[in-house]
Image (cartoon, grey):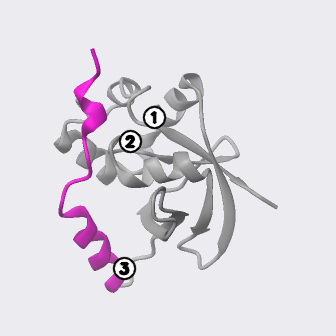
Amino acid sequence: MTDPRRSIRPPAWIKSMNEGLARDGVPLDVLTVPGRTSGRPRSTPLTVAELDGHRYVLGGFPAADWIKNVRAAGTGTLALHTGTSEEVRLVEVDDAEAETVLRAWPEVTPDGVAMMVDAGVVTGATPDAMAEAVGICPVFRVEGTA
């Protein structure tokens, strides 16, 4: 049976929240990838975490369109809150590597994990609860293309 958490989309209010943060000057990391059907650039604010010398992004809402677009394109442009921008390749990691990242995520972005708990993606904001999302929430390693 398919886990129903796989169909969880981002809350409807998240787009306006992100727009408000950007309008208020809150620095955001933004990933832009081609849309899988339109080919038009699609931008998504997200959290980039550096762990053990690698950068990662987490698909905290498994049915989000940006995840499908990344899987289709594999590459995009990452504009960091520091003002730098780079072309990147996004590699979906195996379960062992994903578990390591998921376990660290409550420290990386407690507010993001709280949204995942509220949406029913995970049962709690602990490393163990996050590890239960292996195979449900995709983790991508961000690699430079240069």
Is residue 72 visible in the rendered image? The answer is: yes
Badge 2 marks a residue whose secondary structure is: helix
In whole angstroms, how far apart are the C-alphas of marks 1 and 2?
8 Å
Percent across and percent down for residue 57 are 51, 49
Residues packed near mark 2 inside 10 Å, few (<14), some (14 to 19) or many (20 plus): some
- Magenta stretch contains residue 4: yes
Report the span colored magenta. Answer: 1-23
Closer to us: mark 1 or mark 2?
1
Residue receiving disc 3: 22
Closer to us: mark 2 or mark 3?
3
Residue receiving disc 2: 106
In whole angstroms, how far apart are the C-alphas of marks 2 and 3?
23 Å
Badge 3 marks a residue whose secondary structure is: helix
- Quadrant for the N terminus in the image: top left
Horizontal relation, residue 91 to residue 9: left or right: right
Q: Between 33 and 106, which is closer to the camera in this rendering?
A: 33
Q: Give the answer, above or below, for where 87 lies relative to 125.
A: below
Q: Residue furthest front?
A: 37
